[in-house]
Structure formats: C-alpha cells, structure tokens
C-alpha cells in the first residue's frame, strides 16, 4: 500500500510506504518524482515497510540509470505522532548524485 503523494511545506514530495507496498510501484513513483523534481522523500514505519522501501530504492536506481541519473539515499530517523502515539519512522531522502 503506497500512500498518495503529499507535498510538504518546503515543496518536496513525501511518499509513505507500508509493509504491503509493492516495491515496483513505489520504485516507479520514486523514479517519476526524481525525473520531475530532482528528488523525493520516502517515509517508512516498521521493519516490513523499511524492507519494501529499500527494495524500491534499488529498483528505482535501475529505472533511472539509463537516463544517466545515479540515485543516492540519505536515511534519517524521525519521531512522529500516529493516532496520538509517538512512533519512530525512517525517512529516506532520495536525490541524484
């Protein structure tokens, strides 16, 4: 399950990935956003979601490589509120090198 794109106040696009997200679909979204805006951010909560995100980033690198784009990823921890409960998410900042 891939959440709809959400635009943040600073203009970057945030994708939220779940453990049931299809890595190929997420990769297509990442590749499209990198081509359009030169970067995106992906957020995952939990081991399954992080696993799907890492797979998607690897697939996305293959999607954009023929266009001469080399993706790099910067992971960061983030404390967020989910239904009134504090959770730790991992945010992946993805941009071309």
Image (cartoon, grey):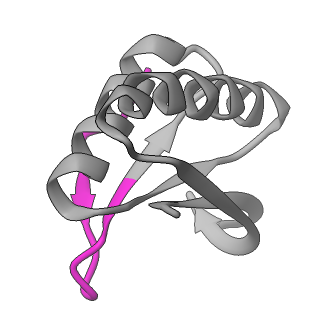
Quadrant housing residue 27? top left
Q: Nearer the viewer, residue 82 or 2?
A: 2
* Dominant SS type (magenta): loop
Relative to 11, does residue 4 appear above or below in the rendering?
above
Please report the residue visible at 56 percent of the width from the left and 26 percent of the height from the top.
56
The answer to whether 4 is drawn above or below residue 56 in the figure is below
Q: Residue furthest left?
A: 36
Whether 4 is among the magenta residues is yes
Question: Which percent across, then down, holds residue 19?
Answer: 65, 22
Say if the magenta span includes residue 25: no
How far across and down, in percent of the image, does residue 61 sit? 52, 33
* Residue toward you, 59 or 67: 67
Q: Quadrant of the N terminus?
A: top left
- Residue most extreme to the right: 47
Residue at the spot 77% in from the left edge and 25% down from the top edge = 48
Q: Tell me where residue 11 appears, x and y as whole percent.
A: 21, 79
- Which region is colored magenta? 1-14
Q: Going by the image, does 45 lie left or right of 12?
A: right
| Residue at (56% x, 58% y) in the render | 83
- Asked whether, in this view, residue 44 is left or right of residue 11, the answer is right
């Amino acid at each position: 399950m891939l959440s709809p794109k959400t635009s943040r106040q600073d203009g970057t696009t945030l994708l939220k990935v779940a453990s049931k997200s299809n890595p190929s679909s997420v990769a297509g979204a990442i590749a499209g956003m990198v081509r359009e805006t030169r970067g995106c951010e992906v957020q995952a909560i939990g081991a399954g979601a992080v696993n799907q995100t890492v797979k998607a980033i690897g697939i996305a690198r293959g999607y954009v490589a023929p266009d001469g784009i080399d993706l790099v990823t910067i992971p960061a921890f983030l404390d967020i509120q989910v239904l009134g409960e504090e959770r730790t998410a991992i945010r992946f900042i993805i941009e071309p090198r």
